[in-house]
Image (tube, rainbow, N blue to C red):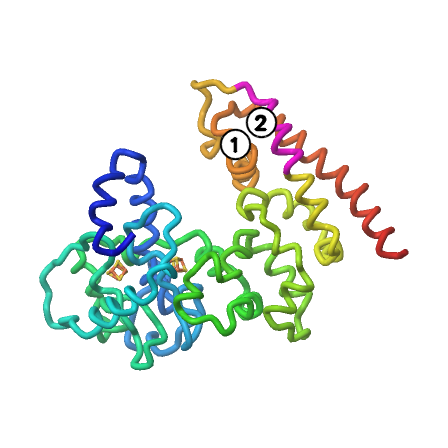
Amino acid sequence: MTLAAFPLWILEHLYFGFVSDFEFRASNLVAAIGLHWGRGKDEEVTLENMTEMPSTLCAPDEEKSCFACCPPIRPPGYEHLQYTNEIKRVLRENSASLMRKEKSLSPITGFSCWALGYLDGGFKRIGCLLHPSQNDGEDQRYRVNYGDKCARESCVEAGIFTHLSPEAKSFWLRLSQGLDSFSYSSSTLNPLFRVLGWGGPLLNLVAMAEKGQDLDGNSILKTYSFFETSLSPRANAYLLRALMDSGNLDLLRNPQFRGRFEELSHRLSERLSLKVLSSSTAPHVHLLPMDSDFLDFLRLSGHILKAGEEEAISLKELVDHELAEFETQVAASLHHAEKF
Ligand code: SF4
Ligand code: SF4
């Protein structure tokens, strides 16, 4: 699809569930710049703190930045790498044509935001030209008429990254060393986005264990080849977290662990989906007062969208029991195999 054809695509798809994707993207998008340059939604931007900025997932260093959630409107599965040349041209045009003194509103229409452009003369970093850091502290993002959304919201991965320890941030950023802004912003090409889905506690643990080892990105993925699994991290974070709670990183480093874990995940997902009696009156599982990683497992891996609380508790008991068995049997067999 070309950029020019995109508005038509939107009209064609409004009745097919695209609106919800738009809502999701729009809310994510607007976070981009609030987090670009190291500021969460509530962090006040001042001229003083604009110079010293902690590393964020949106803007990790001087070589690259993420613009994956700007623009807000995109088809499901959209990958900006397919349109690199066209987008580069638009970014240059946006950067050149921005009228910083203009204050009137100009809503985003169609595919791209007119305020997304290059942030440096070397055309390396891509981000919001209306962000306070680009305008002497003045926040001009209201000009695209999204209210405070641009400053407020973020993607799940950026939230996880924010809560990593400083050492873990710099450790895991090694996975994206050498990527430019286009590759960095691609969840297909940038392994960091996938790895973050496994959750902050585990990533902090690994970074701590490797402190002083000076592994580069490739060596990290070689040592922890588990992270190259095709399983969805968010759908399986509960299982991995439970197995790693004891700090047993040897298991994670074992090359055979990935296959055994994948078997466990598939087996449990199938068992759960067979056990649930779907009832249209049961609450949506994500609303239950339970461990949110477990609820993600039910929903994304077991495809269980609705369940009563008691039912969910009994499923959790079943999963926890299987995890305990896995830990004793599989961990012992992998340990044994390693020895011989
Ligand atoms: S890291 Fe997330 S919030 Fe930041 S720009 Fe990329 S997609 Fe948006
Ligand atoms: S104004 Fe445009 S470029 Fe800036 S954060 Fe909002 S959508 Fe992104």
Q: Position of residue 243 (x, y in %)?
A: 69, 46
User: At 24% across and 50% down in the image, what residue appears?
Assistant: 6
Residue, disc 2: 273
- Horizontal arrangement in the rendering, residue 87 relative to residue 222 (left or right): left
User: At 50% across and 20% down in the image, what residue appears?
Assistant: 278
Disc 2 from disc 1: Cα separation? 7 Å
Stretch in magenta:
266-277
The image quarter containing residue 275 is top right
Q: Position of residue 270 (x, y in %)?
A: 62, 30
Q: Position of residue 50 (x, y in %)?
A: 33, 75
Q: Secondary structure at mark 1?
A: loop
Who is closer to the viewer here, 303 or 154? 303
Residue, disc 1: 303
Task: Indicate whether residue 272 is drawn in magenta.
Answer: yes
Q: Secondary structure at mark 2?
A: helix
Who is closer to the viewer here, 115 or 325? 115
Give the answer, above or below, for where 127 lies relative to 197.
below
User: At 23% across and 59% down in the image, what residue appears?
Assistant: 113
Badge number at residue 2: none
Residue at the outermost bottom position: 121
Q: Quadrant of ligand 2?
A: bottom left
Who is closer to the viewer here, 257 or 208? 257
- Horizontal arrangement in the rendering, residue 245 relative to residue 307 (left or right): right
